[in-house]
């Protein structure tokens, strides 16, 4: 099997505040998360940047993470606009937008505190 034959299909995120996370990702990233029943609990399934996205209640999984263990990075058309959307949807800006030739970059945090890097290229 060659590395080029491996493709990422989706990601599951353990969420502490599931409803706030669903609202945030639907509002900021148009994830179209919808509830479904599985394993005796309610999960949420949608799409994020062409990948399947699932939110699972953290208490169901029993994860004891104090900080996020992954960081998503997105190329976006307007980092400032996405930061504003994130704040409006219950997230927060992390640090300031930085600018270098041909690129702006910034970070946001979702309602559970997971950081997300935003890169705007020109």
Image (tube, grey):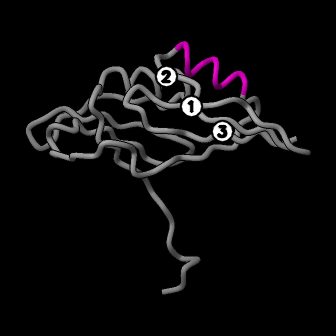
- Check residue 69 for magenta coloring: no
| 74 and 34: which is toward the camera | 74
Q: Quadrant of residue 118?
A: top right
Marking on residue 118: 3
The residue that disc 2 covers is 91
Label 1 environment density (alpha carbons within 10 Å; few <14, some 14–19, many ≥20): many
Q: Secondary structure at mark 3?
A: strand
In magenta, the rendered stretch is 80-88
Q: Number of labelled discs?
A: 3
Q: Is residue 56 left or right of residue 2?
A: left
Give the Cα distance between marks 1 and 2. Answer: 7 Å
Left or right: 38 as drawn, with respect to 103: left
Contact (Cβ within 8 Å) of mark 1 with mark 2: yes
Within-10-Å neighbours for mark 2: few <14, some 14–19, many 20+: many
Write the residue at 31% across / 42% down.
Answer: 66
- Is 86 a magenta residue? yes
The answer to whether the residue labelled 1 contacts the one labelled 3, judged by CB atoms less than 8 Å apart, is yes
Residue 26, image x and y in percent? 47, 25
Mark 2 or 3 closer to N-term?
Answer: 2
Judging by the rendered image, the residue that carries numbered circle 1 is 108
Q: Position of residue 45 (x, y in %)?
A: 35, 37
């Amino acid at each position: 099997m060659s590395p080029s034959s491996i493709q990422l299909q989706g990601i599951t995120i353990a969420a502490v505040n599931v409803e706030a996370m669903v609202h945030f990702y639907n509002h900021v990233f148009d994830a179209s998360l919808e509830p479904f029943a599985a394993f005796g609990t309610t999960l949420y399934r949608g799409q994020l940047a062409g990948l399947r996205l699932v939110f699972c209640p953290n208490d169901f999984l029993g994860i004891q993470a104090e900080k996020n263990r992954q960081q998503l990075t997105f190329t976006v058309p307007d980092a400032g606009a996405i930061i504003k959307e994130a704040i409006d949807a219950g997230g927060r800006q992390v640090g300031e937008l930085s600018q270098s030739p041909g690129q702006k970059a910034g970070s946001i945090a979702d309602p559970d505190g997971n950081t997300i890097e935003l890169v705007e290229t020109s």
